[in-house]
Image (cartoon, helix red, strand yellow):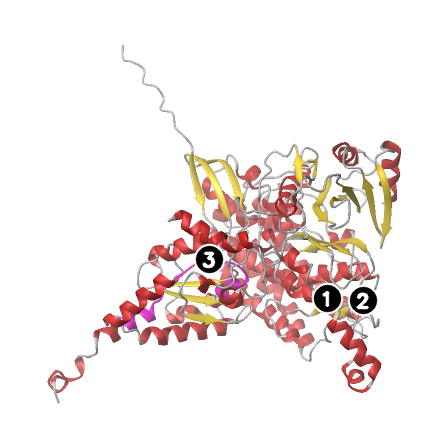
């Protein structure tokens, strides 16, 4: 009933949000943001055994303008923090942040003077992946969770946009 | 290394404070005033030939006095052995010693790190500024009274820098 | 007469090869002053990964420092612990049993191969050769599996303890290790055919970053960096520790030119020599204890802890208070994959170290960047950073 009957099986109907979200999650390009040990596990995830190209993410873009996902992998030190903030601001919308590892989530084992105790003090984080370092499977699980989050991203509703703006301001 | 300690005693008898042997390591405690000459002698002497400086470390013995000390660890490829030199610094408020960058080029960054983390000044260093911490950081973290989590200045550094850039 | 046009005065340009950049060496910033394409000055700016490890060690017992030490050179996790455990054992004046020494050597050499494979992959990747990364990771994953089998951690096994090892080797480790050792030389040939005689590789690496042998010692270079310049020095052979004198291996010297290609050859050969050491260690692995039998240092066996009150108290005190070395200071250096990794530990008789100074090889090597880079083209900077095989956590600690 309805228009599908007349068009047959040649046409797919869906909502705009769903198709755009599907497109976004299928080719999230990470910005190379490996800082410390977790970066090694991130590189290993992109290498041959846990191929991240299966998810369309093998294009690690060095330029933040061309990336939409920032995987903060490694300890965030205070000297580096202004640079991270600037790179986050240079990324274009839509953008997501994954805090990979214990150090990015909360400072990790480094409870000391030069370490920022968690990147979420300065940036809005979407997914936290615990581990020191998290196994590549752990990183992939976190990425898949982010995919689920993106698939439900109601970016066309005004209420969501306001909430997002408020979250950005707070960080 | 006994040989080096004997040579030093002959060449600089008034500079040697004591020689400590512990677990096979020899530490020669010297006075800090002529450290550059002592190091140059150890490098150029053909029997010991300590042409390689492994590391320079700054030490803080708070609350004992003398408070600060500098340790040099030398290695000789000719004899395959090591020597540690230690110099206790006179001043506890403005610790300073001569730089040995003219003897071994590698001392450059080791001394900058000792300055950055411990606050020991090296006279004659070509570029003595902070290396591991930001330029405007206040305090010397490896000193005993500096808290591990950082003081108030450390806690607000990032926000001050981000606000300054806005 | 035409007026003579003056030659335009050009200024040098300062380029910031910033803390975030594609070559995967971490957060290193190099401030480069360029005259056209030629570098006039290249000063590294470090400290973006300074985590205060030396300060943190002063508030912890000796065993609690081990996880921190693992993360100093994160590509060769267990080798850092090797050095630290050896330093504390030197301080205590104890000797680890032979079986534990051999197992430590096996794991250290596996970690060396893994570190060199990673170096090969990323160095090649920076200069445009992406294939060695994927070929090498195939073997590196096998080594990570072996590390995981031993303790559960891939990069940071935390298997070494002060006084020996945490536990004996699990079942199946020796078979898997033999499999790796037997097939590694064939796989190594894969990496060798890709780059060693490759014209492009040679053009990008021969003559780049030249350092003579005397200058290398002056600048404190050690390990493959010094051996590439012709310094015949290996701490495993010249100041042996942990039974390295029982093994027969060569120390490769490259072409002695002191350039990037020479260091590449040294590291490639070192992988084969490490394989040789592991083979000998596996053949000669003696049975026995894996921990020194000293109640002040090692935890008693679990069966006795559950049944005997003295062992329970011993276990409790060792975990709660930690071991207490005598007063004194030692320096212990080992041959890490990056060079001479040294630990200078001062003990004041309590359970917390008074001062731990880590002599990090990457920190010392990076010092000479300006000397190597001056006068070369900007693209050579990437080759130089790659050949120095720096790990930023090792530089900044």
What is the quadrant of the C terminus of chain C in the image? Answer: bottom right
Q: What mark, if any, has residue C130 been given in the picture? A: 3
Separation (CA) of disc 3 from disc 2: 43 Å
| CA distance for labels 1 and 3 | 33 Å
| N-term-proximal mark, 1 vs 3 | 1
CA distance for labels 2 and 1:
10 Å
Q: Nearer the viewer, residue B143 or B125?
A: B143
Image x and y of residue B136, in percent:
52, 44
**Which residues are drawn in magenta?**
A20-42
Give the mark nearest the N terminus, 2 or 1. 2
Q: Chain of mark 3?
A: C
For disc 1, the chain is C
- Residue B18 is marked as none
Q: Is residue C201 above or below residue C88?
A: above
Please tell me the numbered disc located at residue C104: 1
Above or below for C317 versus C189 = below
Residue C96, which numbered label?
2
Q: Residue at x 47, y 50 (%)?
A: C19
């Amino acid at each position: 009933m309805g228009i599908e009957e007349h068009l047959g099986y040649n046409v797919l109907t869906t909502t705009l949000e769903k198709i755009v979200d599907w497109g976004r999650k299928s080719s999230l390009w990470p910005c190379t943001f490996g800082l410390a040990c977790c970066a090694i596990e991130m590189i290993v995830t992109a290498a041959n055994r846990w191929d991240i190209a299966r998810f369309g993410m093998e294009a690690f873009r060095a330029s933040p303008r061309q990336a939409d996902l920032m995987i903060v992998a490694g300890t965030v030190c205070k000297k580096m923090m202004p640079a991270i903030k600037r790179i986050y601001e240079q990324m274009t919308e839509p953008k997501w942040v994954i805090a990979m590892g214990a150090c990015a989530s909360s400072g990790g084992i480094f409870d000391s003077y030069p370490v920022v105790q968690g990147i979420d003090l300065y940036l809005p984080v979407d997914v936290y992946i615990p581990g020191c370092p998290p196994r590549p499977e752990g990183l992939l699980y976190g990425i898949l969770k982010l995919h689920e989050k993106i698939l439900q991203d109601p970016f066309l509703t005004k209420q969501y946009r306001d909430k997002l703006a408020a979250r950005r301001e707070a960080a | 290394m006994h040989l080096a300690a004997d040579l030093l005693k002959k060449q600089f008898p008034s500079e040697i404070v004591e020689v400590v042997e512990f677990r096979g390591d020899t530490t020669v405690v010297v006075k800090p005033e002529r450290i550059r000459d002592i190091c140059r002698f150890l490098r150029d002497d053909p029997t010991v030939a300590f042409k390689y400086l492994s590391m320079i470390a700054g030490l803080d013995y708070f609350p004992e006095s003398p408070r600060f000390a500098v340790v040099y660890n030398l290695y000789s490829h000719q004899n395959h052995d090591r020597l540690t030199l230690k110099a206790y610094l006179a001043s506890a408020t403005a610790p300073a010693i001569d730089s040995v960058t003219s003897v071994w080029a590698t001392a450059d960054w080791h001394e900058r790190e000792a300055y950055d983390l411990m606050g020991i000044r090296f006279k004659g260093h070509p570029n003595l500024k902070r290396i591991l911490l930001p330029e405007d950081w206040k305090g010397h973290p490896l000193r005993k009274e500096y808290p591990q989590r950082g003081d108030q200045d450390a806690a607000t550094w990032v926000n001050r820098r981000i606000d300054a850039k806005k | 007469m035409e007026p003579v046009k003056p030659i335009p005065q050009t200024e040098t340009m300062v380029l910031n090869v910033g803390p975030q950049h594609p070559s995967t060496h971490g957060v290193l910033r190099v401030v480069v002053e360029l005259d056209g394409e030629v570098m006039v000055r290249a000063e590294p700016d470090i400290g973006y990964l300074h985590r205060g490890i030396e300060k943190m060690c002063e508030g912890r017992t000796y065993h609690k420092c081990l996880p921190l030490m693992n993360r100093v050179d994160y590509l060769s996790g267990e080798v850092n612990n090797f050095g630290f455990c050896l330093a504390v054992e030197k301080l205590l004046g104890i000797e680890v049993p032979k079986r534990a020494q051999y197992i430590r050597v096996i794991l250290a050499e596996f970690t060396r191969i893994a570190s060199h494979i990673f170096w090969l992959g990323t160095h090649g990747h920076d200069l445009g050769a992406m294939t060695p990364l994927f070929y090498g990771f195939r073997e590196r994953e096998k080594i990570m599996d072996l590390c995981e089998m031993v303790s559960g951690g891939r990069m940071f096994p935390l298997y070494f303890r002060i006084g020996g090892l945490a536990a004996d080797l699990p079942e199946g480790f020796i078979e898997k290790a033999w499999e790796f050792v037997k097939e590694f030389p064939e796989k190594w040939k894969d990496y060798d055919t890709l780059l060693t005689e490759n014209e492009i590789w040679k053009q990008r690496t021969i003559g780049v970053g030249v350092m003579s042998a005397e200058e290398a010692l002056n600048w404190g270079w050690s390990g493959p960096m010094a051996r590439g310049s012709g310094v015949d020095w290996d701490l495993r052979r010249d100041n042996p520790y942990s039974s390295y004198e029982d093994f027969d291996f060569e120390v490769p010297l490259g072409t002695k030119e002191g350039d990037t290609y020479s260091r590449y050859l040294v590291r490639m050969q070192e992988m084969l020599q490490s394989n040789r050491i592991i083979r000998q260690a596996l053949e000669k692995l003696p049975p026995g204890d894996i921990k020194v039998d000293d109640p002040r240092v090692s935890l008693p066996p679990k069966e006795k802890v559950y049944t005997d009150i003295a062992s329970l108290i011993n276990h409790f005190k060792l975990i709660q208070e930690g071991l207490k070395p005598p007063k004194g200071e030692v320096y212990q250096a080992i041959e890490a994959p990056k060079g001479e990794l040294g630990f200078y530990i001062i003990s004041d008789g309590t359970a917390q170290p008074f001062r731990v100074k880590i002599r990090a090889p990457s920190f010392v090597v990076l010092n000479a960047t300006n000397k190597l880079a001056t006068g070369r083209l900007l693209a050579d900077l990437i080759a130089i950073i790659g050949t120095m095989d720096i790990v930023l956590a090792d530089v900044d600690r």
